[in-house]
Amino acid sequence: MILKKRKVLIVLVIILAGISLIKSLHLFFRDFENNVIFKGVSLLHTNKNNFNFAVIGDNKNSISTFKQIIDSINTDTSINFTMNTGDMVFDGSPVKYDFFLKQLKLFKKPMLPAPGNHDVADQSTERYLSIFGPLYYSFALGSTLFIVLNNSNEEDIDPWQMRWFKEELEKSKNYNHSFVFMHVPVYDPRKSMADQPG
């Protein structure tokens, strides 16, 4: 009886070790060609100088309103792609992300995100990375450079990202136009409005 329990315990330990190994190796062998950012940028015509894009954000698992926005973007033939400034989900739970991924499939044009604090809430940074790709990135369309930053911690940009950002700004001198996207705005007008007498 003791020998049988020991065998069962050894089998369980091996199974758990295997699951842990698979989860950790997933980081290294993830198919980056399937992430939303890579796919979205690859669908853009990078030599194109005449384009329009929509900017949305804070949809937080919205049902009816977000569906109307998606429909409007899909039917507007002048819009080539969409930038989302983050908070795409209400929190980082798998259920909320699954719901958003179903909504994402409704887009007929590329949607490129910046991470928001809700997107990485509840220790879900890994989930964000596995679905969307890098937390910050840049891409060029013709003579325009797009820079997407990660300030989802709602405080600042980390030193490594700031160094990268400075290099991107230096690179932007070679472009006619540059756009920078991030979740938390550089200036929040609500703060000054709160100080004004009502």
Image: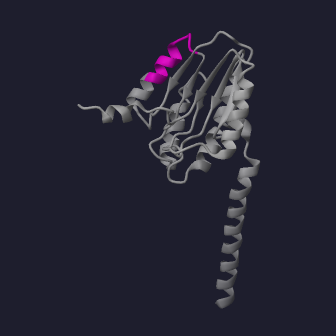
Residue 157 placement, left or right of 60: right
Residue 31, given in percent of the width and then of the height, sits at: 73, 42
- Image x and y of residue 155, in percent: 52, 45
Residue at (69% x, 14% y) in the render: 176
72 magenta-colored: yes
User: Which residue: 29% across, 32% down?
Assistant: 196
Residue 2 or residue 71, whichever sits in front: 71
Query: Magenta residues?
Result: 69-79
Judged left or right of residue 113, residue 193 is left
> Which is more toward the observer, 16 or 61?
61
Q: Looking at the rendering, which quadrant does residue 197 occupy?
A: top left
Colour treatment of the image: one colour
Q: Residue 133, located in which quarter of the rendered image?
A: top right
Examine the image and state in which quarter residue 49 appears.
top right
- Residue depicted at x 74% and y 55%: 25
Viewport quadrant of the C terminus: top left
Left or right placement of residue 154 versus residue 2 in this view:
left
Quarter of the image with the N terminus is bottom right
Residue 20 in the figure: left or right of residue 119: right
> In x, y percent, where is residue 141?
70, 18
> Was residue 24 drawn as part of the magenta stretch in this picture?
no
Main secondary structure type of the part rendered in magenta: helix
| Residue found at x 71% / y 71% | 14
Q: What percent of the width, then of the height, locates residue 18?
A: 72, 65
